[in-house]
């Protein structure tokens, strides 16, 4: 079976020389990628915000202090006012994009209400905004060596400390990003 040219359920790992402040040293989980473009969530840019702040804005009360204290991430520069929950298991929420058999991205309020009641998914990353690429844009950036890519591992998303996710995602494909040069060069 031929390997798909698309990168859904992959990590995009910013190369050290990627100077765009939106993506410097980031790991982006690609949720959707096809001929029309790509959408992903940056998983290592925590904001100075907790899920309880979101609950308060929505007039919800968290039943579990652990859930209330979950960090909120800057998912990307597109629509930073819009929330997304990257989660496992998939569940049956109103507006869920299925990425894998057990991973989804939900953008509806019902998942947040369930989380406030302690009935949400067992693993979740909350993000405001997303990263988006138009048709051919991500492929062009890959050809320009702006990104490394490799299959995603939920342990990096949900279990790895945020400050180690960039290195951990690269290590999955055998790369030590700290040994890469930030300078572009041509042989």
Image: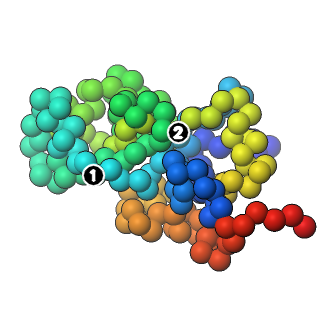
Which of the two residues, 15 or 91, is positioned nearer the viewer here? 15
Q: Is residue 128 above or below residue 185?
A: above
Q: Residue at x 69, y 53 (%)?
A: 146
What percent of the width, then of the height, locates residue 82?
37, 30
Q: Is residue 8 above or below residue 11?
A: above
**Considering the image in quadrants, where does the N terminus appear?**
top right
Question: Residue at 12% across / 29% down in the picture?
Answer: 59
Residue at the far bottom: name it: 179
Residue located at (54% from left, 56% from top):
24
Residue 166, above or below 6: below
Residue depicted at 17% across the width and 32% down the height: 57
> Helix or strand or loop: what does disc 2 sit on?
strand
Sequence-wise, the earlier of marks 2 and 1 is: 1
Assign a secondary structure to mark 1: strand
Quarter in which the C terminus is drawn: bottom right
Residue under label 1, please give it: 48
Q: From the viewer's side, name the closer residue of 89 and 96.
A: 96
- Numbered mark located on residue 131 in the image: 2
């Amino acid at each position: 079976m031929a390997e798909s040219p698309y990168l859904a359920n992959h990590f995009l790992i910013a190369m050290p020389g990627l100077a765009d402040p939106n993506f410097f040293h980031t790991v982006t989980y690609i949720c959707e990628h096809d001929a029309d473009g790509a959408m992903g969530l940056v998983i290592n840019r925590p904001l100075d915000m907790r899920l309880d702040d979101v609950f308060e804005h929505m007039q919800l009360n968290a039943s579990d202090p652990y859930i209330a204290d979950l960090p909120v991430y800057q998912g990307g520069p597109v629509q930073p006012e819009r929330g997304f929950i990257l989660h496992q298991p998939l569940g049956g929420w109103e507006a869920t994009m299925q990425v894998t058999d057990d991973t989804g991205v939900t953008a509806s309020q019902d998942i947040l209400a369930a989380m406030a009641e302690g009935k949400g998914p067992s693993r979740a990353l909350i993000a405001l905004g997303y990263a988006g690429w138009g048709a051919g844009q991500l492929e062009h950036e890959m050809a320009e060596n702006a990104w490394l890519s490799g299959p995603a591992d939920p342990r990096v998303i949900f279990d790895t400390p945020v400050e180690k996710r960039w290195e951990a995602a690269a290590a999955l494909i055998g790369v030590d990003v700290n040994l890469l040069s930030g300078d572009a060069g041509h042989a």
